[in-house]
Image: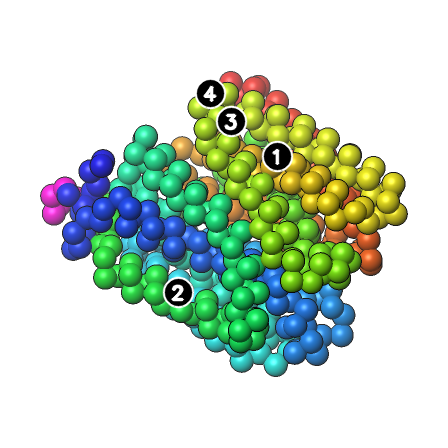
Amino acid sequence: MPQSTQNVSKDTAVVTKPPLGLFEFVALMATMTSLVALSIDAMLPALIQIGDALNVANPSETHLIVTVFFVGMAFGQMFFGPFSDSRGRRLTILVGLCIYALGTFVCMMATNLEVMLLGRIIQAFGVSGPRIASMAIIRDLYVGDAMARVMSFIMMVFILVPMLAPIIGQTVMDWFSWFHIFTLFLAVATMSGLWFFSRQGETLPRAKRKAFSWEAFFASSKFILTHPAVMGYTFAMGCIFGAFLAYLSASQTIFTVYYDMGEWFPYIFAILAFSIGLASYFNGRMVMRFGMRKLCRFALKGVNMFALVYVGLLYAYNGLPPIVLTVSVMFIGFFFVGILFGNLNAMAMQPLGEMAGLGAAIIGSFSSLFSVPIALFVDSFLSGTLMPIGLGFLVFFGLAYASVRFAEKVREIAE
């Protein structure tokens, strides 16, 4: 196993815990980062019941319980990125988990949708801490092929959690009620926090921490936000994820109301989530062979072809194709979407060099803030058919393609 900074001298590290074995380290980091997916996807089977309990007049408004989570994460990433580099990984995780727990309690006490949404934003802001710090810890301890190996193992968990989370949420509802999905969140956050603080030491020594500077923050932000290639890729990420988020936040309505699939919804969702996980695995195996730009071009053509075919099917079947046809076509389309997620982010990060930490926070935040209005706009037209979802795919996947073409031309001119 590659050696980590946990084994180096005291003047370069401040770790007080013994180094973890690879299996335990991967399991711990995967648990910390997977809290995000669990907090989103386990909620999906409960949206209708939560809407009834909170007396929501318009059932489509419950989609906001998923959508606003990404608003909280956008601001959380902006805060915890610099915080992690200046105050260390352990404090970042502690603060993040405490804020996450506070947001969960707010959700549990909610008597109306507005308070529930406030709790979800607080939850999302907090969970950004463990997510960012965990990724930073991996970068602290592993480099090169060793880091790629660890990330590949963690990606296997990323494939499983979105598949299993709705099934877990449905199981909790079957045995108890939607309220106890939040109890589950608290239990997982507490367990992962205790595990982390009892086993994993600090990985960023004080000597390597970067004191936060507003001057440096604004200078770096200006460079990133005015870099046409970086923002071209970031805008494309926002368009791709925005169209996908429209589907994600409306998925329970689509499969339980429009298709009347009832308790089959978590399993249908799992099948489609597996497509994205499969794409991540495929991308990890192929990116070194073909390169991220070639794979990105391939996937952009794929998602736009998927959107055209899907809109054609929607017209042919009056906006609601048979369930088997819908799932089959979406499975293929989401495979291309899964390839784009990682590659677009890597392409946006490439010009940033030493600003990688802040760049990751800004790119993640802005792509999320782009995506939320897109999802809200698309979902506002849902009224019994999937035509708005299909047209959303068609329009915003097309915009993503144009944005990447623009960014690539800028990059070629710069080179």
Residue position marked by numbered label 4 in the rendering: 289
Q: Is residue 134 above or below residue 185?
A: above
Type of the residue with mark 1:
Phe
Pick whichever, 384 or 65, lies toward us. 384
The boundaries of the magenta stretch are 8-12
* Residue with the mark numbered 1: 336
Spatial CA span between label 4 and label 1: 18 Å
Does the image show residue 229? yes
Asked if disc 3 and disc 2 are in contact, CB closer than 8 Å, the reply is no
Disc assigned to residue 292: 3
Q: Quadrant of the N terminus?
A: top left
Q: Residue at x 40, y 38 (%)?
A: 152
Q: Of marks 2 and 1, which one's residue comes earlier in the chain?
A: 2
Find out whether residue 108 is within the magenta segment: no
Residue that mark 2 sits on: 189
The reply to whether dot 3 and dot 1 touch (C-beta < 8 Å) is no
| First-in-chain label (3 vs 1) | 3
Mark 2 surroundings: few (<14), some (14-19) or many (≥20) residues within 10 A: many
